Image (spheres, grey):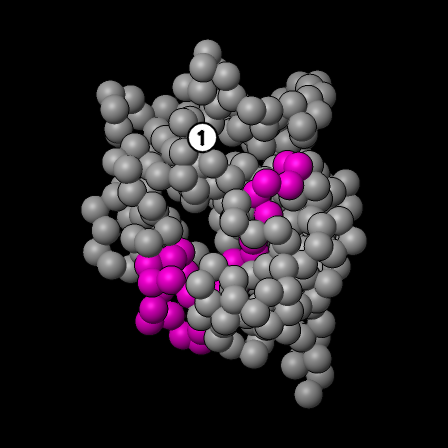
Amino acid sequence: MVQLADPVAQGKPGIPPRVGERLRPASAQDEATAPDDLDASFGRLANECPNLIGTLAGTFAAEGRSHAIPSFTFRGPGDGFAQRRIGFFALLHGDEPAGSTALLRWLELLAAEPALAAGYDLVCYPVCNPTGYARRSRHNHAGLDLNREFWRGSEQAEVQILEGELRKQQFDGVIALHADDTSDGLYGYAHGRVFNENLLRPALRASERVLPCNRRAVIDGFTACEGVITECFPGVLAPPPDQQPRPFEIIFETPALMPLDKQAEAAQIALHAMLSAHRGFIAHAQHL
């Protein structure tokens, strides 16, 4: 079982390694321990930051050992209104580590400046496919693409754990981070709602400081406009179909063949831009 650091542990906090070292390409010798190493990086940050709480979303057995899907919640200071809760999901495909790197860097920034998350509880799931990540494989141990399994009665333990979290948490928004090795630029799925597009577009503009936007008319087989797609594949990670009011849902994609460091930087900028845009919409609605 993956062991997370105790978020209330006492004593002198250690200095975590550089982010680039946390997600170095795995060798044959360290593939089996890579998920534990990644969890430990988030766990160390949770030890040092009182706003960040680490726990396990769930555990499951596969290939003779126990695996876990960790969860880390950053509790922003209050802003006078009810806390909004947003879920962030990375490494649903085990060969796409840039999203987890971005989450780690973003949480490090928030730990230093908690006011940036005022009014929000940010729930991060940095390793949604631990067996796939151990292999650096898109698929899980059963050879399945987990991002085609949601809300379809899947028997995959990872999907059942995450579906349980999506129902329990009742998020106000869901953001999934992915990387596409067929794209030469950034893009995203806004799932057909104008509100979602209004969150995604400023994120793409902001992150273009680091990587270009994919402006092709067709991306991943779907019609696109300035990097925004409003349709999506069936079975992707999403809020419960019956959840009302409907939360926003966005998939943000980085170009997987670009340097990992640049992908992570672009995704981190995008996360901050989406949160800022959402805060702006909420503030406007509260003053109507």
Q: Closest to the observer: 78 or 44? A: 44
| Quadrant containing the N terminus in the rendered view | top left
- Identify which amino acid the numbered label 1 is placed on: Arg
x and y percent of residue 114 in the render?
73, 48
Q: Is 256 a magenta residue?
A: yes
Left-right relation of 195 to 201: left
Left-right relation of 29 to 153: right
Quick one: SS at disc 1? loop
As drawn, 225 above or below 21: below
- Please provide the residue range marked out in magenta: 232-260
Main SS class of the magenta portion in the image:
loop
Q: Closest to the observer: 154 or 45? A: 154
Left-right relation of 248 to 165: right
Q: Is 120 a magenta residue?
A: no
| Quadrant containing the C terminus in the rendered view | bottom right
x and y percent of residue 249 in the render?
50, 65
As drawn, 63 above or below 255: above
Is residue 245 visible to us here? yes
x and y percent of residue 228 in the render?
58, 68
x and y percent of residue 68 in the render?
38, 32
Residue shown at 35% from the left, 39% from the top: 139
Residue furthest bottom in the image: 288
Q: Exactly how many numbered labels are in the figure?
A: 1
Residue shown at 59% from the left, 24% from the top: 24
Q: Residue beneath label 1, please?
A: 136
Residue shown at 67% from the left, 59% from the top: 213
Few, some or many C-alpha atoms within 10 Å of disc 1 (few <14, some 14-19, many ≥20)?
A: many
- Quarter of the rendering containing residue 270: bottom right
As drawn, 42 above or below 242: above
Residue shown at 71% from the left, 50% from the top: 211
Is residue 50 visible to us here? no
